[in-house]
Amino acid sequence: DSGVTQTPKHLITATGQRVTLRCSPRSGDLSVYWYQQSLDQGLQFLIQYYNGEERAKGNILERFSAQQFPDLHSELNLSSLELGDSALYFCASSVGPGKMNTEAFFGQGTRLTVV
Amino acid sequence: GESVGLHLPTLSVQEGDNSIINCAYSNSASDYFIWYKQESGKGPQFIIDIRSNMDKRQGQRVTVLLNKTVKHLSLQIAATQPGDSAVYFCAETGQGAQKLVFGQGTRLTINP
């Protein structure tokens, strides 16, 4: 158990809908990262937050947004969903903004299926 | 641009044999490399890392080799066990370490 909690584990929704994925980082970690993984593809970096503020952005679609709340949990909002958005979405957390290394821990992921 | 790729998508080895998983990267500015293991239904799990000022690092049953001249990274797993079956990803990051760039992944299958 990495200590990073993601909910829900599975999500099935229809095209055009909006969903929210939730991540609770490890106790003491201030940074949260979101990644998308399609099938057996590599993980694509979406966005990073540190202590409530956006720190880095990857190839995140405009239909997607995220935020980190004062209690440090984070939510990834996906709207106007398309079939191609079906993927595993992972959250990772680390102590600081520049410590995406040994101190980073991944959650179990949320499997999103868009039908 | 940045890219981290893997030479082989699948690798099958006999239980007890050694495994070597390879990875090529293109960003010469990368200064930190990590191997992750991802088992079915789970998130990536850190295995071992290496900094760009090193060419070899050993862990428990695993060794990572870095060849900066040809931008090549490898993961060696000694005496593979059934529990080693997973997808292995290499990842790299540059200064500031704001994000990890992951490779495609290699699926390692251990044959009894």
Image (cartoon, coloured by chain):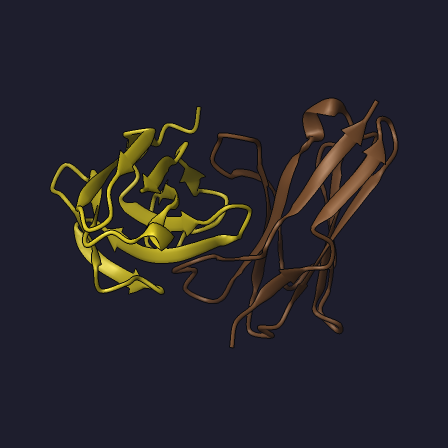
Chain colours: A yellow, B brown
Q: Is residue B101 visible?
A: yes
Left or right: residue B84 versus residue B41 is: right
Q: Is residue B28 left or right of residue A46?
A: right
Q: How many numbered discs?
A: 0
* Relative image position of residue A71 (x, y in whole percent): 14, 36
- Residue B43 picture location, percent across and down: 47, 36
A59, B27: nearer the viewer: A59
B30 to the left or right of A61: right
Most foreground residue, A115 or B63: A115
Along the viewing direction, whichever of B15 and A12 lies nearer the viewer: A12
Q: Quadrant of the C terminus of chain B?
A: top right
Work out which residue is located at the far bottom of the displayed protein and give it: B1
Seen at 19% across and 51% down, the residue is A16
Question: As displayed, is residue B95 above or below residue B81?
Answer: below
Residue that appears at 74% across and 54% down: B8
Q: Is residue B18 above or below residue B103?
A: above
Residue A24 in view in this figure: no
Task: Give residue B32's position: percent from left, percent from top.
Answer: 56, 59
Q: Position of residue B59 (x, y in %)?
A: 70, 37
Q: Residue at x 43, y 29 (%)?
A: A2
Asked which quadrant contains residue A108, the reply is: top left
Quarter of the image for residue B15 reads top right
